[in-house]
């Protein structure tokens, strides 16, 4: 994922694992999603979830953090080799975000990204477009989140 | 939006306005989206955005907070009348999220939700399903975020 030309449909990236703590789940939810099952253990036990679980927006935001860290690692490794990596543009949005299972306290989520499609941008020929499926799976192998993102990536030819 | 039966396609809800501050934009981005144009004014000025702007996940999370507050207000008003409101289930996911314009420091975003479709759940006949378009527009009337959510809502008949 250094330049458009280096990316192929089917490429998979393991972005890392994140374990959700109660403090972190409540800290996010108090700010952005203060539903009882995200902020209070006792209320969560009485809810259909049965226990405290993370806001879906929180599980998505952790994917973003790991993706940014992954790109940074790639960039630093390239710089160490005296190379540079293409700029990955801001995401334009995403499609088909699904929260498939709750993320409970202590769940360890493995985040990954798989390239679905690559194409040159018609409107901006110096750039390519990557469509990728982002996923998170828990320690039992159950998918908890899935969505498809599309973002610009610099073409080597243009650099 | 108290029970399924009270909701009609075309209903619109104004969820409130949120003004994004630099401290808040950076606070979210440091945790979840530490790209230069979200965490550092000088780097943002050199980027294609031209100035510090909010993570798209941040603008989405603020929608969630306002929606939760809106539902809470409805619930409290109903309780004050001696009534109750139907439970709105957790969202199952989102479709077609688009970040249409950057959200800069000081931008005041008006969030809203419009019901697109209502139907009884085939698998859970005590529940209805609401599809809604969530939007955020800035002080110039430009749409900055749009997505479609689907969530369960309790039927009055079942209560």
Image: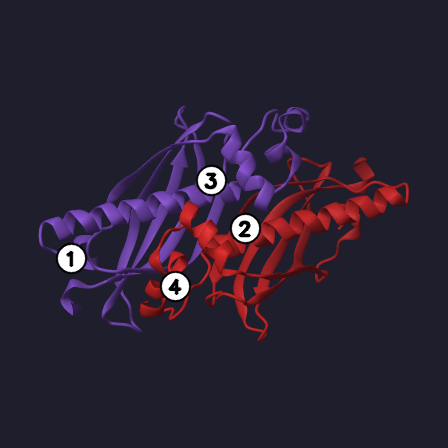
Chain colours: A red, B purple
Q: Residues within 10 Å of mark 4 (few under 14, many from 20)?
A: some
Numbered tag placed on residue B84 in the rendering: 1
Between the C-alphas of marks 2 and 4, the distance is 22 Å
Q: Name the spot of residue A8 as percent of width and height, x first.
A: 74, 57
Q: Residues within 10 Å of mark 2 (few under 14, many from 20)?
A: many
Instruction: Kindly check if marks 1 and 2 are in contact, taking CB atoms under 8 A apart as contact.
Output: no
Residue B26 vertical placement versus B113 (above, below): above
Q: Looking at the image, which residue sits at the far left? A: B82
The secondary structure type at the circle numbered 4 is helix
Q: Nearer the viewer, mark 3 or mark 4?
A: 4
Instruction: Kindly check if marks 2 and 4 are in contact, taking CB atoms under 8 A apart as contact.
Output: no
- Residue at horizontal 49%, vertical 56%? A23
Instruction: Name which quarter of the figure residue A18 lies in.
Output: bottom right
Q: Residues within 10 Å of mark 1 (few under 14, many from 20)?
A: some
Residue A97 vertical placement versus B139 (above, below): below
Q: Name the spot of residue B81 as percent of width and height, x first.
A: 9, 50
Tell me, yes or no, whether dots 2 and 3 are on the same chain: no
Numbered tag placed on residue B7 in the rendering: none
Between the C-alphas of marks 3 and 4, the distance is 27 Å
Tell me, yes or no, whether dots 3 and 4 are on the same chain: no
Between the C-alphas of marks 1 and 2, the distance is 33 Å
Q: Which residue is mark 3?
A: B59
Tell me, yes or no, whether dots 2 and 4 are on the same chain: yes
Q: Which residue is mark 2?
A: A61
């Amino acid at each position: 994922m250094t330049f458009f030309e280096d990316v192929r449909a089917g490429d998979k990236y393991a972005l890392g694992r994140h374990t959700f703590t109660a403090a972190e789940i409540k800290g996010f939810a108090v700010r952005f999603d203060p539903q009882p099952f995200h902020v209070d253990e006792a209320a969560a036990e009485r809810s259909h979830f049965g226990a405290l679980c993370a806001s879906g927006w929180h599980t998505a935001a952790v994917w973003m953090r790991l993706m940014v860290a992954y790109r940074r690692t790639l960039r630093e490794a390239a710089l160490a080799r005296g190379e540079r990596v293409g700029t990955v543009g801001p995401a334009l949005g995403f499609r088909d975000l699904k929260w498939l299972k709750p993320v409970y306290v202590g769940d360890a989520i493995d985040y990954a990204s798989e390239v679905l499609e690559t194409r040159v941008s018609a409107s901006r020929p110096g750039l390519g477009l990557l469509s990728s499926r982002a996923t998170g799976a828990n320690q039992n192998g159950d998918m908890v989140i899935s969505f498809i993102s599309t973002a610009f990536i610099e073409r080597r030819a243009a650099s």
